[in-house]
Image (cartoon, rainbow, N blue to C red):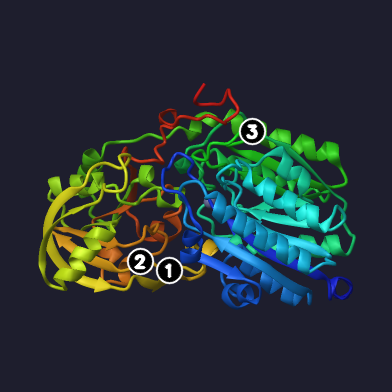
Amino acid sequence: MTMTGQAVSSGARVVIGGILHETHTFMEQETTLADFTAQSLHFGEDIITSMQGSRTGIGGMVDSAIEYNWQLLPALYAAAMPAGVVTAAAYRELLSELRDRLAQRRPLDGVLLALHGAMVAEGELDAEADIVAQARAIVGGAVPIVVLLDMHGNISPRLVELTDVLIAYNTNPHIDAYARGVEAAEIMARLLRRELQPTSAYARPALLLPAQSTATESSPLSLVHARAAEIKADERVISIAVLAGFAYADAAYTGPSIIVTTDGESELAQDYATELSDLLYRHRQSALPVFISPSDAVAEAKKSGSGPVMLVDSADNIGGGTTGDGADALAAMLADDVREGTIVLADPDAVAICWRAGSAAEVTLAVGGKVDDWHGRPITVTGTVLALSDGVFECELADNHFASLYGNTIHMGRCAWLRVAGVNILLTERKTPPMDLAQLRHIGIIPEAQQMIVVKSAVAYRAAYMPIAAAIIEMDTAGLCSANLSRFPYRHLKRPVYPLD
Ligand SMILES: [Zn+2]
């Protein structure tokens, strides 16, 4: 940023806001306004108080706006834990808040939004395009709108048309949300200084990626990012968004996509977008995961002598919206007499029983498999309540998936540490993805001392757990984020698409 630039964009009236939800449309549990309130729902100045300094995308936007000396106009910030379709009532409420605040703050110089890209509301399959269309209707065609997306977004051509510049996280696990928020603000600053004439192109391979194939350090996405990095050296290129898509949100444009924005060079943008999309499609076979049964995975993990083996339960990937109560892997660990195995289960009934019994009590109860028929059955265990907690912890890892959405303090609801034979079960009232070691440590479980740890996650666990992991094993468990996409009854997705057709 130059001093002259600072002077020019200084004082600009820029609205900042965000509505983020990754929607699993095959899930029955709807997402209500209460789910946003429980996680992250802030209006007006409260956004600055709550999110400034956080490692979220909006945190990066707020910090940059202050540095640019803009007249910052915070609208609303809403993020909820991934789950089923957002209710019409919740969606209407969030949108009307955004619309009202945009209208009240006119005249405006720019709008910066943090959206997910895979949000589906009751009656609105392409929520992000609808949100930007409604914002556009209020601010008019001349005010730049820059949008930051989660790289799991399913992007429609309509969203690209409505937005001046779209960028997305480059990493999964999402450790660059804050940096991308800063980048979004930087692009806005250049737009405010009239330095750019952005033109964007979109390309989409006929492909779906299961969640565990969306890691950015593995093929196929690593190859696309490597080529994108080369293309970015071209000075005419403003940004490249590589979207992996979210296969479990059934909409017309579900799946990966590429958005390239150049400075006034529309053909160049299209050439690069098509090249990257083709590259991804050519390597589609590397996206087909290999799985083994939970009992084989446990037997394999028992052979490890050096630190915890991650047993990856990606079918019950909480970050993808699942229940977090699948107990298949627990059953396998108990059946194989594991010494020092750990699993986290979201089970408010079991937590209540442990709290009533109290610390040090012995209890017999059913755990897991209670929410729906997709995640296996409850299993009955007898064990000792080793500790109880309020389930609040601060992330150890500054840049992680949690912090990218909700800020650094995580609330799991009441928790209980139940010890059954050699297995530690952390029972939580609210489902909470395994994105930070403090989740286990806060109650006394030492992650490094485990022989195996079940992680209910596809990729997001890696930032926190890979530094201590001896190995990872992908398990074939029951769950709504199964990598076997032919299990899901798609109705809206454009066909044909690999690997379904
Ligand atoms: Zn994501």
Q: Sequence-wise, which precedes: disc 1 or disc 3?
A: 3
Secondary structure type for disc 3: helix
Q: Position of residue 275 (x, y in %)?
A: 71, 34
Mark 1–mark 3 contact, CB under 8 Å?
A: no
Q: CA distance from mark 1 to mark 3?
A: 38 Å
Q: Position of residue 330 (x, y in %)?
A: 22, 49
Residue at horizontal 38%, vertical 59%? Answer: 432
Q: Which residue is mark 3?
A: 279
Q: Looking at the image, which is closer to me, 82 or 213?
A: 82
Rendered-image quadrant of the N terminus: bottom right
Mark 2–mark 1 contact, CB under 8 Å?
A: yes
Residue at horizontal 46%, vertical 47%? Answer: 84
What amino acid type is highlighted by mark number 3? Leu
Q: Looking at the image, which is closer to me, 133 or 326?
A: 133
Horizontal side, residue 355 vs residue 42: left or right: left
Q: Sequence-wise, which precedes: disc 2 or disc 3?
A: 3
Sort mark 1 into few (<14), some (14-19) or many (20+) by Cα contacts within 10 Å: some
Q: Which residue is mark 2?
A: 439
Residue 2 vs 326, above or below: the answer is: below
Could you say which disc has been placed on residue 280 in the image?
A: none
Residue 310 vs 110, above or below: the answer is: above
Q: Where on the picture, by quarter, is residue 290?
A: top left
Q: Looking at the image, which is closer to me, 126 or 199?
A: 126
Q: Looking at the image, which is closer to me, 494 or 208?
A: 494
Q: Which residue is mark 1?
A: 410
Q: CA distance from mark 2 to mark 1?
A: 9 Å
Front label number (1 vs 3): 1
Sort mark 2 into few (<14), some (14-19) or many (20+) by Cα contacts within 10 Å: many
Disc 3 Cβ-to-ligand 1 distance below 8 Å: no
Q: Sequence-wise, which precedes: disc 2 or disc 1?
A: 1
What amino acid type is highlighted by mark number 1? Ile
Secondary structure type for disc 2: helix
